[in-house]
Image (tube, rainbow, N blue to C red):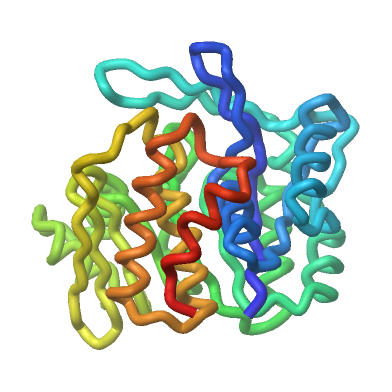
Amino acid sequence: MRPLIFGEVLFDQFSDGTSVLGGAPFNVAWHLRGFGLDPLMISRIGEDAGGHEITQAMTEWGMDVRGIQIDANRPTGIVKVTLGSGQHTFHILPDQAYDVIDAQSAREVFTESGAGLVYHGTLALRSPESRAALEALLETGDTPVFLDINLRDPWWQAADLPALCTRARWLKVNEDELNLISHSLDIGSPRLEEQATGLRDRFGLELLLVTCGARGARAWSVDGKCHAVEPETSIGVVDTVGAGDAFTAVVLYGLVKDWSVPTTLKWAQAFANAICEVRGATVRDKAFYARQTHRWPP
């Protein structure tokens, strides 16, 4: 079940001058490779220094770069990250290379990849070109979809959510996003559990995952059970950028390895904690990943 990861790859630029590879889909793909899987990333970068750095980093990390398209007219994506009042704010620039992923090229790579699972977020779908590319992939068969909702204002529309959720088998949101989605779909209840079960039932999801920041995470499975995991309280937080993506990457790994839901939640939360102890959402140290995965079940 080789994962195909679709969406943005970009640089998170922090106010202290540091710049770290990022983008939710790219973060997930990077982690999966760190875990020893072979994800295929489909995205688009600029014909610029940032784009060159991305392909070089992917090559050195052992990632497949066949799905990375080059755009001569648009820049490699950038997000400016600012920390204020304990919260990160994101300024996401418009008209980036990942906004115009080419459908035909993406479909050709997908057809040849043997991918058995498609992961995508929602930011890259802000543009009709990249949205059409994803649709082209999903029209080629019945490959199951993992949807990771990232509601970044002003780059999302409530009217798009039902169609996205309908075709997903697995869905991950944070608790703020769950609240927004529940109100936009008239699920209505202010209680997290009722919102989650309402969303799961509305779209027949096999698994709904909700991350709750400092309160850990919850998962509602198709059999009606609710599973929970609590966070570590002794970690030294550098920043929380990419913690949700780290969590998702382990969930995908657990799906590939057929882990139980409690096992998946345990190690997903542990890896999210580890990412909070470093700057940015990705790490280029293979030993970092080895320290995580050596504790995992086969």
Q: Position of residue 245 (x, y in %)?
A: 47, 50
Q: Nearer the viewer, residue 222 or 31?
A: 31
Q: Nearer the viewer, residue 57 or 105?
A: 57
Above-or-below relation of 57 to 40: above
Q: Position of residue 110 (x, y in %)?
A: 78, 70
The residue positioned 37% from the left and 35% from the top of the image is 240
The residue positioned 76% from the left and 56% from the top of the image is 63
Which residue, as the protein is rendered here, is positioned at the far top? 16
The residue positioned 45% from the left and 34% from the top of the image is 278
Above-or-below relation of 25 to 208: above
| Quadrant in the rendering for residue 140 | bottom right
Which residue, as the protein is rendered here, is positioned at the far bottom? 223
Q: Nearer the viewer, residue 172 or 29?
A: 29
| Quadrant in the rendering for residue 228 | bottom left
Is any part of residue 163 visible from this angle? no
Above-or-below relation of 181 to 141: above
Is 174 on the left-hand or right-hand side of 67? Answer: left
Q: Position of residue 182 (x, y in %)?
A: 24, 56
| Quadrant in the rendering for residue 46 | top right
Above-or-below relation of 167 to 57: below
The residue positioned 85% from the left and 61% from the top of the image is 104
Is any part of residue 24 visible from this angle? yes
How many numbered discs, if any? 0
Q: Nearer the viewer, residue 3 or 150?
A: 3
Is 237 on the left-hand or right-hand side of 23? Answer: left
Q: Position of residue 275 (x, y in %)?
A: 43, 43
Q: Quadrant of the N terminus?
A: bottom right
